[in-house]
Image (spheres, rainbow, N blue to C red):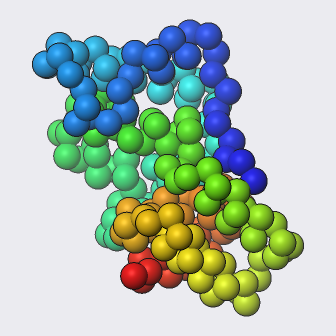
Amino acid sequence: MTVTQVVLTESEKNLVDRIQFDPLKIEGGVERVQAVCSAARELALSLLNRKAIPEHRIRFFKDPDYNIGGHGSSRQQIMERNLNGKDFLASVHFLKYLQYFIFGPSLPAPLIDRFGEVVKNCGNVTSGDIIPLGDEAKKLVRKHGLESNNAAEEFYKLALECGLQEYEARSIRDRVKKAK
């Protein structure tokens, strides 16, 4: 399985080239940060206007049910509150979501392929498949030397990519969190 990358227009590709998605790696001071955030806002609006982002990725950001530990608030709602009404699309804190919107979960390609293959082999995923899928995810976390807390959220995203329901993806995430 390969995670679907959003197909970008030429102008969107040019915007991506101007964006450093890791805020800690932006060099050049405040002006550079503002330029990156401006390009990110323009790119996000373009992608949203043409409905290019897969629905489950949008829901990850907008739907409170997809924000585990969000106390009933979506990631967007939390960001809007924290920014006191400022445009969250132009916030440095939005960069990681924009990166996810475009590229999908941040996991090694072999891991994504293996997990996708295991999900595909399940056919229609049932409740009886969730524990074995979670165990496979934990094995993959160990094999690839990933830190379980960060990997848990990325596996949640990956499970959504694989077509699992939100509650199934949440169960996979919870199992990965327990990986040692």
Is residue 79 shown above or below 44? below
Q: Residue at x 63, y 78 (%)?
A: 136
* Quarter location, residue 41: top left
**Front residue (pair 142, 58):** 142
Quadrant into which the C terminus falls: bottom left
Residue reaching furthest left?
29
Q: Is residue 148 visible?
A: yes
Is residue 4 shown above or below 74? above
**Front residue (pair 97, 131):** 131
Is residue 140 shown above or below 35? below
Residue reaching furthest bottom?
128
Q: Is residue 130 left or right of residue 42?
A: right
Q: Position of residue 58 (x, y in %)?
A: 54, 45
Q: Position of residue 80 (x, y in %)?
A: 28, 43
Q: Residue at x 18, y 39 (%)?
A: 84
Q: Residue at x 64, y 33 (%)?
A: 6
Q: How many marks?
A: 0
Q: Position of residue 68 (x, y in %)?
A: 41, 69
Q: Is residue 174 visible?
A: no
Is residue 36 shown above or below 114? above
Q: Is residue 21 left or right of residue 49?
A: left
* Quarter location, residue 88: top left
Q: Residue at x 43, y 64 (%)?
A: 146
